[in-house]
Image (cartoon, rainbow, N blue to C red):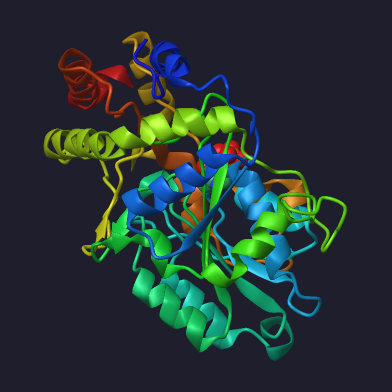
Amino acid sequence: MINIFNLNNSAKNLKNIVNKINFNETAWVNGGEIKNLEKQTRKILKTKKEVCTCNSGSDALLLTLQHLKRKDKDIIITTPISYIASSSIAKFLGYEIIYIDVDINNYLLDLDKLDNFLKNINKKIKSRIAGVIFVELFGNTGDLKKLSKICNKYKIWSLGDCAQSLGTKYNNKSSLDYYDFAISSFYPTKIISTYGDGGIIFLPKKFKNKFEMLKNNGHNLTDKTKCELLGINSRLDTIQAYILNHKIKNFKNYLIHNKKNFKIYNKNLKNFLKLPELNKKSSTNGYLYSFRIDKKLVKNFLNFMKINGIEARQFYARSLPENKVLKPIIKTDLRNAKKCSAEIISIPSRASLNNYEKNKILDTIKNFFNNSNKIN
Ligand SMILES: Cc1ncc(COP(=O)(O)O)c(C=O)c1O
């Protein structure tokens, strides 16, 4: 089976990495290796933001949303198509949610609809809106200048959920830098991954100390008896930082290969599939090759890929508001999200695919559409 994520292959690398670990290390949490990782990440992504590692992308959302919490601002706007955490963590902290529909062409929160919504919503609700969580789904991003303009106009913050988009750029700059705060994940399926979980927050410099305390049960590292604020334990393990410091050296290489695969797929498949139309100024990290196909063909397509030994998946077949516990405070028109959740499919496009595997994927897809009348 040609899998979307090749977790076994990356496990082989673990042996090499483990050999390089300094086993005389004593700081298995909060040590120099963590500082080194934070420094490397800033350098490689060329971000102006300060960074703070933690235990997962979900914790990165939790810590950031906790920091942003205000009594009178308890509503967050976000996308209905994403991994659960971008909504559930907000709900967990007591925020209400409003979903804005996605753009049918790129599956990301529709910024014109966002602007329109904020323009027309009654004052009582508007005064409670704290900010927007913009999810860079599949590694893609939108018009981030427009997003900042909207957020400035309505005096709300922006939080980029960049769990899938490390390395994605807008206008030749890391997309992370366009948000007030951004987070990412080192989950094993992500573009830079640990052998466990890990997360990172991109934040303004002035909040670095506060976030260090938030993830260390509210104390600083010199006086562990003094609790300065209420926090949690969300420290990235040193052993994971060793792995990430090793892998991050290859980050540019992953991006080059991912993007190359996207180019080959686009060239070969553009006449068969509805490919996403990305903002001209944006450049994706090539995380996951995803597209829409006619709802009537989805079941047969997935089946055809499976019998040909290729994994194809609908990652977001259930939109977030369809979950009882993630219901919004007010209903909005989510017709594109409904269509996207029924029609978006992802296929293997990772950097580690060999030419035989890539050709097999392309031939199988062409074969399906050339014969789709017969297959149906
Ligand atoms: C869009 C999105 N947000 C948040 C997360 C949460 O990251 P983690 O699994 O590290 O908690 C993920 C990844 O799983 C994700 O894909």
Residue at the limit of the structure toward the left, as seen here: 267
Q: Quadrant of residue 289?
A: top left
Quarter of the C terminus within the rendering: top left
Residue 56 shows up from this direction = yes
Return the residue nearer the eye: 293 or 209.
209
Quarter of the N terminus within the rendering: top left
The spot of residue 33 in percent (x, y) is 51, 37
Image point 86% across, 58% down: which residue? 226
Question: Ligand 1 is found in which quarter of the picture?
Answer: top right
Taking the image as shown, residue 335 lies to the left or right of residue 303, namely right
The spot of residue 210 in percent (x, y) is 68, 64
Image point 34% across, 52% down: which residue? 43
Q: Quadrant of residue 278?
A: bottom left
Image point 74% across, 49% down: which residue? 216
Residue 165 shows up from this direction = no
Taking the image as shown, residue 126 lies to the left or right of residue 362, namely right
Q: How many marks?
A: 0
Placement of 33 over or under 41, stated as above or below: above
Placement of 374 over or under 63, stated as above or below: above
